[in-house]
Image (spheres, helix red, strand yellow):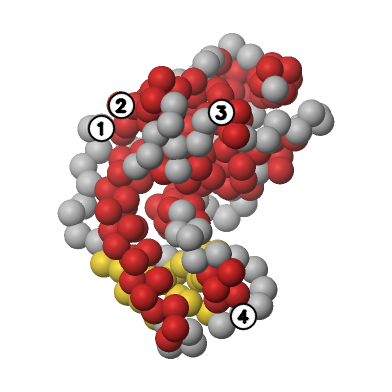
Amino acid sequence: MRLHAPSVIAAAAINLLAVGASISIAADFEITVNAAETPHLKEWAEESKELLLKWKPRLVNLLSSPGFEAPTSAEIVMRKTDEGVAGTANGKIYVSSHWIEKHPEDIGLMVHELVHVIQDYPNGAEFWICEGIADYIRWAIYEGKEQDWFQRPKEEGGYKQGYRVAGGFLLWIESNDGPGIVNKLNRALREGEYKPELFEEATGKTLDELWDAYTAEG
């Protein structure tokens, strides 16, 4: 774990861990690897498996909620394809061969995908928050990227782009007006009770007011 800005990023992680610290974590977690289509990438898949086994308990703690039962298994499926990067469905993480062949160093994408395995939100969950949480954990917590690394597009509702844009926004809220916001959002999405007003309840500012303040600093 590489933290380049401990005063901001580590504090955000502590906010999450403090909320979920009382939730027990299952010790057993099995990951299988299917590299039948891409035997030349089996070693990469095995290395990513070890990374996920190490990070799974941390991610469960970060994304805990009352009554939540963490998954006990996942599968890494290496696909021979010239399209896409990676995706997750029903506990399976699908990884595109062409991306890994060109970017073998991009093992952090597996942390993003394991977040989705653990989120286990119902269908229809807010897209930008789902992807924003995954990239917040991948880039801010795992990669240790500083706040200034994240893009801040100066457009109304820019957070709806999700991914890194939303991840940086969530990091900023965690570090300023709303420590613990990621855990609150995670719980609300998992229970099907998300509403935009949650941001105002947690910070005293509406979602759009927070976004305006965030982009004004960039």
Q: Quadrant of the N terminus?
A: top left
Amino acid found under the numbered disc labelled 1: Ala
Seen from the viewer's position, the closer of residues 183 and 151 is: 151
Please say if 215 is above or below 141. above
Q: Residue drawn 39% across and 34% down?
A: 3
Identify the residue at horizontal 22%, vertical 46% (top origin).
25
The residue singled out by tag 4 in the image is: 81
Left or right: 38 in relation to 55: right
Which of the labelled discs sits on residue 18, or is there none?
2
**Residue 192 can be seen in this image:** no
Q: Marks 1 and 2: CB-CB under 8 Å? A: yes
Instruction: Residue 200 in the image: state x and y as whole percent.
Output: 60, 18
Give residue 120's position: percent from left, percent from top: 45, 54
* Total labels drawn: 4
- Residue type of the residue flagged with mark 4: Thr
Q: Are marks 3 and 2 in contact (CB under 8 Å)?
A: no
Vertical order, 189 against 119 (above or below)? above
1 or 3: tag closer to the N-terminus: 1
**Kind of element beneath mark 3:** helix
Q: Which residue is mark 3?
A: 147
Report whether 43 appears left or right of 101: left
Near-viewer residue (39 or 192): 39
Q: Position of residue 127 (x, y in %)?
A: 63, 47
What crowding class fits label 3: few (fewer than 14 Cα within 10 Å), some (14-19), or many (20 or more)?
A: some
* In this rendering, the label closer to the viewer, 1 or 3: 3
Crowd tier of the residue under label 4, counting other residues whose Cα lies within 10 Å: few below 14, some 14–19, many 20 or above:
some
